[in-house]
Amino acid sequence: MRAYEIGKLLAARGHSVSFVTSQYSSRYSGQQTSESEVFRIFTYIPPSSFKNRFRAIDRLWNRLLCSAIGLRNYEALRHFLIARTFDIAYIFNTERIGIATVLAIQEKAIPLVWHAGDNYLAKHFSYWPGLSPLYQFFHQVFLRKVTTMERKIDFSNLLLVSEFLKNDFTKKGFRMKNPVVISRPITTEIVAAPYAPSLPRYFFMACRIDAQKGIHIAIEACHLLQKALPNHEWSLLFAGVSRNSYLDQMYRLIKKYHLVQRIKYLGRISREEVIQRMQKAVAFINAPIYGEPFAGTVLEAITNNAPLLTSNDGSALEVVKPGLTCLVHEKFDASCLARNMQSILSETGLAARISAAAKADVLNRFSAEVILDKTEAYLKGAIRSPALNTK
């Protein structure tokens, strides 16, 4: 759930909530809104867009800009707080506005709670400096003031979205005093109607078109499924944003296995269409081969009736119960995924049972009310704890 959605739900419970965020980027093409509780004061550094051989250098420069902009945003936030005070600050994703920005809050003795939905903090403080001496050199020499400010910030109150992410922080060397895991909640309504896939039957994937998402594993599985069920009518549809040559590799793989009539890339589709496709799919395939911090797409598929076929990597297994609410395969094992796809197509009632069990389970464990109760209790506890003042 996005920060704004969490804030709105807290406001609905009677809390006074203000949103302090970045100004609209020049690249933003959506509708710009103006609400009294939203203050757009920060300068935002867009992600690197290079795709050529200089991409690594550009990404390093982009990360350094993200750190440096913290000086400007710190001053903007300090000025904003002159005539305002708050009981607590709930911090989401400072990657592109600069971590140093947050020091202005701490200097007002306002307790901080950090929401970690990815491993950026761990990479910034521990992983990248060790991996890239050049990254560390620039921080220590040219961004010394920013680095000093960042090291003053208190990270005692750290909420992470999964045990997998907490372990990743530990592996990357980020020292945590009292990390707490509170998952993200369901962000869409659970479909009340029973599982009823459309005909002809199709498997569906929606993700970034990237090797880490394991689309090639799914294509390999389709090749094996074609051999096992040559006369069955089924297909694989996949959708998402493509930003590199991986999609071309997938086209070549599809052609190599003679699956042109079975597999179709839908391009970048709207969220509404993603949900519609989930609701009518024979199953949703989640096949990442790297650790996803939180399986949000998995939750979305389950709430929209799609039986889940997932790899065992990342946080997905914290959301599902293998054999009961999903079918699981080893992350590189296309043959296991193919067998699971075959089971969905061939075993009467299996897909419907998985769909129903998964919906009931996530409603019990990941509803907005359940997660918000935990979040609210944690925030109240953090208000009572002493804040670190660095004036």
Image: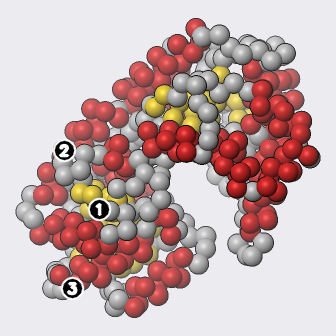
- Horizontal side of 288 relative to 194 (left or right) equals right
- Horizontal side of 41 relative to 369 (left or right) equals right
Number of other residues with Cα within 10 Å of mark 3, as a class: few under 14, some 14 to 19, many 20 or more: few
Indicate which disc, 1 or 2, sits on the residue closer to the N terminus.
1
User: Alpha-carbon distance for marks 3 and 2?
Assistant: 30 Å
Q: Is residue 364 above or below residue 379?
A: below
- Coordinates of residue 4 in the picture (x, y in percent): 57, 34
- Coordinates of residue 151 in the picture (x, y in percent): 77, 31
Indicate which label's residue lies in the foreground, 1 or 3.
Answer: 1
Secondary structure at badge 1 equals: strand
User: Alpha-carbon distance for marks 1 and 3?
Assistant: 19 Å
- Circle 3 is placed at which residue position? 227
Secondary structure at badge 3 equals: helix
* Label number found at residue 329: 1
In which quadrant of the rendered image does the C terminus lie?
Answer: top right
- The amino acid at mark 1 is His
- Residue at image x 35%, y 72%? 218
- Horizontal side of 243 relative to 272 (left or right) equals right
Number of other residues with Cα within 10 Å of mark 2, as a class: few under 14, some 14 to 19, many 20 or more: some
- Circle 2 is placed at which residue position? 357
Which quadrant holds residue 29? Answer: bottom right
